[in-house]
């Protein structure tokens, strides 16, 4: 499947879920994927997680348009993750959890933000 087609499909699925969940409950918690989940998942599941995250970032970038609000993380996400392929992100996150087994409860999105995106965003 072509990457853009896959991103559009996953984006549609994520958007559907995001729109359906608030309708089902007034108060809810968003599930957090931690290193425990990550290390127990298959390589395909890890890549699917990253494709979903990239789709959300892309969706937010599209919604913000040419004039994003002053307090946004989208530029850092986009610039910081741009040097990586999905496979490279999987490897980097795998390596981080392997090097930090005592931090397996840290959310994957935090690893993506602090260890991948923020570090690369300023080095363009």
Image (tube, helix red, strand yellow):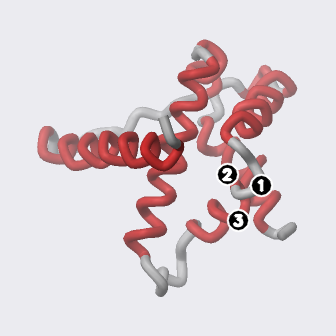
Mark 1 crowdedness (10 Å alpha carbons): few <14, some 14-19, many ≥20: some
Q: Is label 1 in a helix, a strand or a loop?
A: loop
Percent coordinates x, y for residue 117 in the rendering? 72, 55
Percent coordinates x, y for residue 64 in the rendering? 42, 75
Observer-nearest residue: 66 or 121? 66
Q: Is label 2 in a helix, a strand or a loop?
A: helix
Nearer the viewer's eye, disc 2 or disc 1? 1
Percent coordinates x, y for residue 1 in the rendering? 48, 34
Which residue bears the numbered disc 3? 79
Single out the residue that lies furthest toward the front.
2
Which badge, 3 or 2, comes first in the chain's sequence? 3
Which residue bears the numbered disc 2? 113
Q: Residues under labels 3 and 2: Cα distance?
A: 11 Å
Single out the residue that lies furthest toward the bottom.
67
Task: In the rendered structure, find residue 83 and report the number of the disc placed on it.
Answer: 1
Q: Residues under labels 2 and 1: Cα distance?
A: 14 Å
Q: Residue at x 43, y 45 (%)?
A: 5
Asked whether, in this view, residue 78 is left or right of residue 15, the answer is right
Which badge, 2 or 1, comes first in the chain's sequence? 1
In this rendering, the answer to whether 8 lies above or below 101 is below
Q: Residues under labels 3 and 1: Cα distance?
A: 8 Å
Q: Residue at x 58, y 16 (%)?
A: 41
């Amino acid at each position: 499947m072509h990457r853009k087609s896959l991103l559009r499909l996953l984006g549609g699925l994520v958007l559907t879920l995001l729109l359906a969940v608030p309708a089902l409950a007034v108060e809810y918690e968003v599930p957090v994927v931690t290193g425990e989940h990550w290390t127990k998942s298959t390589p395909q599941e890890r890549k699917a997680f990253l494709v979903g995250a990239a789709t959300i970032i892309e969706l937010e970038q599209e919604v913000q348009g040419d004039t994003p609000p002053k307090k946004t993380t989208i530029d850092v996400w986009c610039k910081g993750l741009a040097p990586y392929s999905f496979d490279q992100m999987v490897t980097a996150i795998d390596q981080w959890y392997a090097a930090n087994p005592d931090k397996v409860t840290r959310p994957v999105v935090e690893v993506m933000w602090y260890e991948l995106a923020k570090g690369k965003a300023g080095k363009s």
